[in-house]
Image (spheres, grey):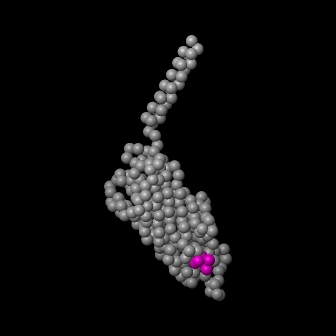
Amino acid sequence: MNTKHLLAGFAALAIAGTASAATIKVEGELLFGDSPFAITSSTGTLQFDSSLMGALGTAGINFSAVAPALYDSTDAEVSTTISSFTYESTTGAFSSVTLAGGGKFAMPTTKFVFGIRVGGPGDVSLTDLTINLGSKTVSAFVSGANGVVSGTYDIFSFASSTGDTAITGAGSYSFATSGLSLTTKGVDLISQGLKLSATGKNILSDVESFGTLAGTVNVTAVPEPSTYALLGAGLLAVGSIARRRRNAAND
């Protein structure tokens, strides 16, 4: 399998976004040119920054994964798979990548620090995180307590990205984003779900980086129907020859 390592960012996506060709969503099989390809495996990770973990500890906020994502509290890392991605049909340039599952922030009880109320009780879940490479934003389906209106919102923005910019055929394609920070809407929604006070909201707003998002997609070519037909014909021919040889030996 041909593995590509492109250290340039996703700048080409801004150009690809102006093309007239359609953007295609992939959830298992894709077409590039006239050839079909299949996603054989994928991984996605959200690595939390230490500053975020410190803020969560101070505020008494718990975190857990939403299936199928898994959370390793020792490494502060959420691991999952890529559920879908979109690409530009003529150039193969990536437009967005969606991670399966997500995470839940929760404050089971009201939390006080030095006698000052921080927040709670409440919770908020962020699932189906979609990395929008052109706009450098990350949207998520948000649901939670305390009157949070469930829906998809731009929750994060990111400072930079590295990795592969486009699909060019069978291979392994990787990307990473860094400098993940909450948008104003993200701060408001999480604060509402967790019922944060002004103090709690300030603690959340002061987190400079939530961490990094990364992923890898492995793509292989799918044989054309004509390939299967040729293979079938070849097997029939081999079988026929074997039968003739057996018959000749018996005679």
Q: In which quadrant of the rendered view does residue 34 lie?
A: top left
Looking at the rendering, the stretch of residues picked out in magenta corresponds to 54-59
Residue drawn at point x = 53 percent, y = 25 percent: 239
Q: Is residue 170 above or below residue 233?
A: below
Residue 243 coordinates in the image, percent (x, y):
54, 20
Residue 36 coordinates in the image, percent (x, y):
43, 45
The reply, left or right, for residue 111 in relation to residue 232 is right
Residue lying farthest to the top in this orientation: 251
Q: Is residue 216 above or below residue 157?
A: above
Depth order, front residue of 93/1: 1
Q: Is residue 243 above or below residue 216?
A: above
Residue 11 visible (yes or no)? yes
Q: In which quadrant of the rendered view does residue 73 lie?
A: bottom right
Q: Quadrant of the C terminus?
A: top right
**Main SS of residues in magenta:** helix
Residue 93 coordinates in the image, percent (x, y):
39, 56
Residue lying farthest to the front in this orientation: 249
Residue 101 coordinates in the image, percent (x, y):
57, 60
Residue lying farthest to the bottom in this orientation: 115
Depth order, front residue of 35/129: 35
Residue drawn at point x = 55 percent, y = 70 percent: 48
The reply, left or right, for residue 7 in relation to residue 249 is left
Depth order, front residue of 93/244: 244
Residue drawn at point x = 50 percent, y = 60 percent: 215
Residue drawn at point x = 59 percent, y = 69 percent: 76
